[in-house]
Image: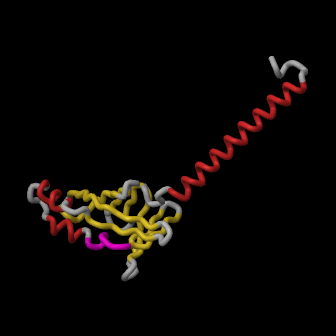
Amino acid sequence: MLIAKNNEAERSKLWRIVITVSSVLIVVIAGFFLVRMFTSNPLEGDWVSEGSELALDIEDNDRMTVSLPDVVEEQTVQVELQYSLDRDGKTITFTEIPGALAGQAESSGGQYTEENLRSALTNLTTTFSYSVDQGQLTLTEREYGEQMVFERQ
């Protein structure tokens, strides 16, 4: 055993190697968390509205799924939207995917129409200022100042 012997030079060399490797490892881990903290999407995840049954599933690829409770009685309809996120301005804009609402209305078998979906999404397809604080997402409409509050699931 190298450590069991009383060879001070070998022990010192081994100690320097251990300290160097652990220092490099600490710097790499700290760099990873710093990059992740400033480049990740703060809104990514599942969010449920406090006031209604509205639910958002925000993904990292600029797509999201909205669960709409009021389109068909006793049935929740899920609609896919796209969004653009401005981290510097802390704004998010939700927009329809062209043709997606029409395709979903056709596949519903007449339970709802494209206009039903569009009217259910009118409060959501706009630009919001966002704030995330301790698992709570607050979307504030830029034009009128109306707020929607969501809890992280």
Count up the numbered dots: 0
Q: Residue at x 23, y 69 (%)?
A: 120
- When the figure is inspected, residue 5 is found, relative to residue 34, above or below; the finding is above
Q: Residue at x 11, y 57 (%)?
A: 106
Q: Position of residue 27 (x, y in %)?
A: 67, 46
Quadrant of the image containing the C terminus:
bottom left
Q: Is residue 97 left or right of residue 16?
A: left
- When the figure is inspected, residue 112 is found, relative to residue 23, above or below; the finding is below
The secondary structure that dominates the magenta segment is: loop
Q: Position of residue 93 (x, y in %)?
A: 36, 69
Q: Which residues are magenta?
A: 122-127
Q: Position of residue 46 (x, y in %)?
A: 39, 55
Q: Residue furthest bottom?
A: 144
Q: Residue furthest left?
A: 110
Q: Position of residue 141 (x, y in %)?
A: 38, 76
Q: Residue at x 49, y 56 (%)?
A: 40
| Residue 76 image-quadrant placement | bottom left
